Image (tube, rainbow, N blue to C red):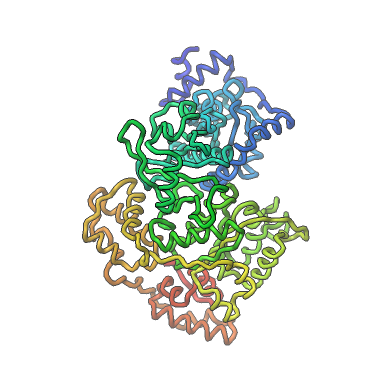
């Protein structure tokens, strides 16, 4: 049957790549769409041999696949990795979907080439060596027609296609959106693979625009100590106009740029490891480059090799670090003490970027290849925070997952554990955490068996923990275990790079440069920013939407008036109704409740202002309101 006949058997509008795949299945592979073969599975020994050969790829991919699965937030979805032969090596999915998908061969060890499984995301991606989506009835075999697959190739540092990353779903996901996320994830895996295969190399990061250095758009080169190129990522090949990594590997840095390894390293050190200009050899094409020396080549007392903008995840929120001298010093100090395993406590206002700063410290350290696990102690209900941190075995308590659950501490093994808003951790749990820090062992709920853990600890709070210690609300011994070094992150209003930061965030929110009138810029620079970078991002996101392509002016920033308007008054409830709800409180709680009600009325029920007045996080205040039986119909 020719291509025309194939198209008649497919849904209207089928992409030509799928039509060509059906043609191959019929003419080359001699498959019959009416007779689906049983899934082809390799035996356990063969699968383990393949996984062993691809161990560095698997280690680079597992965390990224897990992150992508969480981003998709769909229980009827699987993130799948195959090798270049179409054999599935790893799957990230819910246990329920994994059991259902196993019947069609979506399991480790199954072969998904076109020759075996017909037209499908993984096999067709391998055949084309390019991204592809195969929707429902576009699958060659009918038993796969309830699924939609999107897949992208993954290349090794030499430019060879070594794997396929796929999202298979039974839900109606937007495939273009999924392909974009898959492409980003594949680039992160490829960059991790360069780091794993060339751990003792110099790492060169470059782009034509300095703000794109250390994002997924940057070019990456690995260089040996003589300046010879060992590996390149796909962005580097594109920016340099080179067709393959083989065309670069073996050449020296001086063959590509108008600089040498020693010269570029010296200029980067002088610039405190911010990107510096570098020109293409035999041309005027300018790049901004940052050269990162091997970890063992950093001289004592020198700035950390990791750049100030390095964040472990793809495109991080701007503002954690940048050109502000105070923030750069704090990052330098944090990286130096973390290198010796010292815990770091971050102090800063809400929204100042404590977690993003912590990610930068993680990315700069020797545990960068491990997991960065963040826990917001204020956002988890007190009844669940112990299970969240320590995990639990199957059937440990009512409502527990049947298979049990690894806690955040075990998830951080080999990486970094970041405990945000640590001041809101209940006292009983503080004692357990202290024991874990002392013994470096953790026991999940429902079991007496302990497991060894090794992680770097970073913690943060907008509150003064020593004040909490003085009032008996925080353990003094835990404070000194957390605060090997205590660093204070400046608020946005205190930062020297505020203008550059505003322009950078605005460009991120607009998807490119956005015109800004002078009076709007003055308003932005003069604003107090009580919500810090988080508030800035929300304000600029709204401004971009309101401006709709026009220059951003004051009228597009209605939330930034000279005097911030209080929240709309909350409808007053009859006092009898409020008092009736307080019937079961003890006298001390009744007194506290009355004082809190007065404060709420004073601030016109603006929860953020009340929380700031009490020096509490909003989540902690909501828990207090719930305990004191003060109804809040809507969070501000």
Q: Percent from the top left, x then y, of residue 488? A: 47, 67
Q: Is residue 224 above or below residue 494?
A: above
Q: Is residue 470 above or below residue 439?
A: below
Q: Residue furthest left?
A: 518
Q: Residue at x 54, y 58 (%)?
A: 336
Q: Percent from the top left, x then y, of residue 495? A: 37, 64
In which image quadrant can residue 119 be found? Answer: top right
Relative depth, front residue between 392 and 283:
283
Q: Give the total of numbered labels.
A: 0
Relative depth, front residue between 321 and 407:
321
Q: Residue at x 50, y 21 (%)?
A: 21
Q: Is residue 412 above or below residue 614?
A: above
Q: Percent from the top left, x then y, of residue 3? A: 46, 15
Q: Percent from the top left, x then y, of residue 613? A: 44, 77
Quadrant where the C terminus lies?
bottom left
Relative depth, front residue between 537 and 100:
537
Q: Residue at x 70, y 50 (%)?
A: 403
């Amino acid at each position: 049957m020719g291509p025309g006949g194939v198209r008649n058997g497919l849904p209207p509008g089928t992409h030509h790549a799928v039509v060509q795949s059906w043609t191959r299945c019929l003419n080359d592979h001699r498959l019959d769409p009416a007779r689906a073969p049983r899934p082809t599975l390799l035996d356990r020994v063969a699968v383990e041999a393949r996984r062993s050969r691809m161990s560095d790829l698997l280690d680079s991919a597992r965390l990224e696949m897990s992150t992508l699965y969480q981003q998709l937030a769909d229980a009827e979805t699987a993130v799948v990795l195959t090798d270049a032969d179409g054999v599935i090596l790893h799957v990230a999915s819910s246990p329920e979907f994994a059991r259902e998908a196993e019947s069609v061969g979506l399991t480790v060890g199954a072969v998904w080439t076109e020759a075996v499984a017909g037209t499908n995301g993984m096999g067709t991606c391998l055949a084309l060596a390019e991204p592809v989506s195969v929707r429902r009835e576009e699958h060659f075999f009918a038993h796969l027609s309830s699924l939609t697959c999107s897949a992208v190739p993954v290349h090794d540092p030499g430019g060879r296609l070594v794997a396929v990353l796929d999202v298979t779903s039974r839900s109606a996901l937007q495939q273009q959106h999924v392909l974009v996320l898959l492409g980003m994830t594949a680039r992160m895996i490829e960059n991790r693979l360069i780091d794993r295969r060339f751990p003792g190399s110099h790492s060169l990061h470059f782009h034509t625009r300095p703000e794109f250095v250390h994002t997924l758009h940057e070019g990456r080169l690995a260089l040996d100590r003589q300046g010879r190129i060992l590996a390149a990522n796909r962005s580097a090949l594109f920016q340099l106009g080179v067709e393959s990594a083989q065309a670069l590997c073996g050449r020296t840095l001086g063959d590509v740029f108008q600089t040498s390894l020693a010269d570029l390293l010296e200029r980067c050190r002088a610039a405190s490891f911010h990107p510096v200009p570098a020109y293409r050899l035999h041309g005027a094409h300018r790049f901004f480059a940052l050269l990162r020396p091997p970890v063992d080549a950093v001289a004592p007392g020198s700035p950390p090799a990791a750049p100030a903008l390095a964040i472990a995840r793809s495109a991080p929120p701007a503002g954690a670090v940048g050109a502000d001298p105070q923030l750069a010093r704090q990052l330098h100090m944090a990286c130096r003490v973390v290198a010796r395993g010292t815990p770091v406590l971050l102090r800063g206002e809400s929204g100042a970027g404590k977690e993003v700063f912590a990610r930068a410290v993680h990315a700069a350290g020797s545990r960068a290849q491990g997991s960065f696990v963040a826990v917001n102690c204020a956002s988890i209900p007190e009844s669940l925070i112990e299970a969240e941190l320590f995990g639990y075995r199957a059937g440990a308590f009512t409502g527990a997952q049947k298979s049990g659950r690894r806690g955040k501490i075990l998830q951080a093994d080999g990486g970094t554990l970041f405990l945000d808003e640590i001041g809101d951790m209940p006292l009983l749990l503080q004692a357990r955490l202290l024991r874990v820090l002392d013994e470096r062992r953790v026991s999940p709920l429902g079991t007496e068996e302990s497991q060894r853990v090794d992680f770097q600890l970073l913690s943060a709070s907008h509150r003064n923990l020593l004040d909490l210690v003085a009032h008996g609300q925080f353990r003094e011994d835990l404070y000194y275990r957390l605060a090997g070094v205590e660093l204070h992150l400046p608020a946005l209003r205190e930062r020297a790079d505020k203008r550059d930061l505003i322009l950078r965030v605005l460009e991120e929110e607009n998807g490119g440069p956005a015109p800004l009138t002078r009076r709007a810029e003055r308003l932005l620079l003069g604003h107090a920013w009580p919500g810090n970078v988080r508030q800035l991002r929300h304000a600029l996101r709204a401004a971009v939407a309101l401006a709709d392509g026009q220059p951003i002016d004051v009228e597009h920033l209605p939330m930034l008036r000279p005097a911030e308007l209080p929240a709309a008054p909350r409808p007053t409830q009859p006092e009898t109704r409020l008092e009736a709800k307080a019937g079961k409180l003890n006298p001390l709680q009744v007194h506290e409740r009355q004082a809190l009600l007065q404060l709420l009325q004073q601030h016109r029920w603006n929860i953020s202002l009340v929380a700031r007045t009490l020096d509490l996080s909003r989540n902690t205040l909501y828990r207090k309101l719930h305990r004191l039986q003060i109804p809040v119909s809507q969070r501000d």
